[in-house]
Structure formats: C-alpha cells, structure tokens
Image: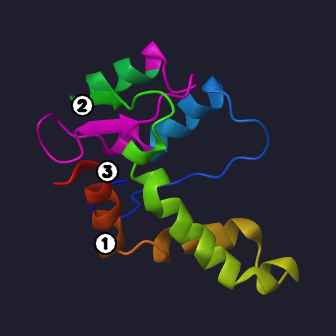
Amino acid sequence: MPADGFLAWEFTKGTFNRERFMAASESVVLDHVGMYPGPRSVVLIDNASIHRTTDFVDQVNLRGGIVLFTPPYCWDLTPLDNGAFGAVKRFLQSRMILIRDGDIDMEVALDVAFREAVSPRDARRCWYQCYGR
C-alpha cells in the first residue's frame, strides 16, 4: 500500500500458499515496482513464510526495487494491518445487509471497499502510525 492508498489487489478462493502468492504478486506487486530509491521501489511485507521466498525477492530486485520484511509478529509495523484493513472491514460491515441478501457479490463488495474505504489521507495516517514520517 503506497502512502496514498491501495494500488492493486487480487482475490483468491481456497488456501493461499507460496505458489499462489507468487502468481498474485505478478500483477499486484511486481508490475508496480520502481527503481530504488524512486517511488514504489521499496516493498515492505510481513514476515509470513509464503512471502519469504528468494523468487519473490529476486523478482523485486530484477525490477530495481528492494524488499524489507517486518520482524515476526509485528502487525504494528505494517500499514495494511495497522488501520487499512480495519477501514475495509468497517466499510463492508456497513453494507453487510446487501452482501448477506445477495444484492452485492462479495468480490464486488471487496473491490469497492478497497477502492473507497481507504482515502489518501487514511493511507498516510496508517503509514505514519507505523513509521512516523
């Protein structure tokens, strides 16, 4: 998540493993990586085992970026976990009756939530709560 909101996302059904992470990261992350130290050149990602793959790091490096992993179990250093997901959850909860009644497909609701629930101001707040800059 850049400091101005969600850039891309992907939905998956079923278990999310290393292979599915690599496939999803192509469009969700790798297509957006810039040359370090320029914009979008640092990929900050949590320490989940499916993320800690040399293939992923190599692919980011090939695009000129670098990967930084948060320390294990440090959700408070991840802007996505530290506020952004809460905003998406609240957005979905406010529309739960439409989702539950089938008026809105869950994937459509998630797509709308990721686009609308986290404003650029919210994204900067999540980022600054983690890093203070």
Q: Is mark 1 on a helix, strand or loop?
A: helix
Mark 3–mark 1 Cα distance, whole angstroms, equals: 16 Å
Q: Residues within 10 Å of mark 2 (few under 14, many from 20)?
A: many
| Rendered-image quadrant of the C terminus | bottom left
Q: Residue at x 49, y 52 (%)?
A: 81
The residue indicated by pointer 2 is: 65
Total marks drawn? 3
Looking at the image, residue 112 lies above or below residue 128? below
Question: In the depicted view, which residue is nearer to us: 122 or 42?
Answer: 122
Q: For residue 100, which numbered disc appears in the image?
A: none
Which callout, 1 or 2, points at the residue further toward the start of the chain? 2
Measuring from the top left, give residue 131's x and y in whole percent.
24, 49
Q: What element carries label 2?
A: loop
The residue indicated by pointer 3 is: 130
Measuring from the top left, give residue 79's x and y in whole percent.
39, 52
Mark 1–mark 2 Cα distance, whole angstroms, equals: 23 Å
Q: Which residue is drawn at 58% across and 51% down?
A: 10
Measuring from the top left, give residue 37's x and y in whole percent.
11, 37
Identified by mark 3, the residue type is Cys
The residue indicated by pointer 1 is: 120
Identified by mark 2, the residue type is Gly
Looking at the image, residue 78 lies above or below residue 91? above
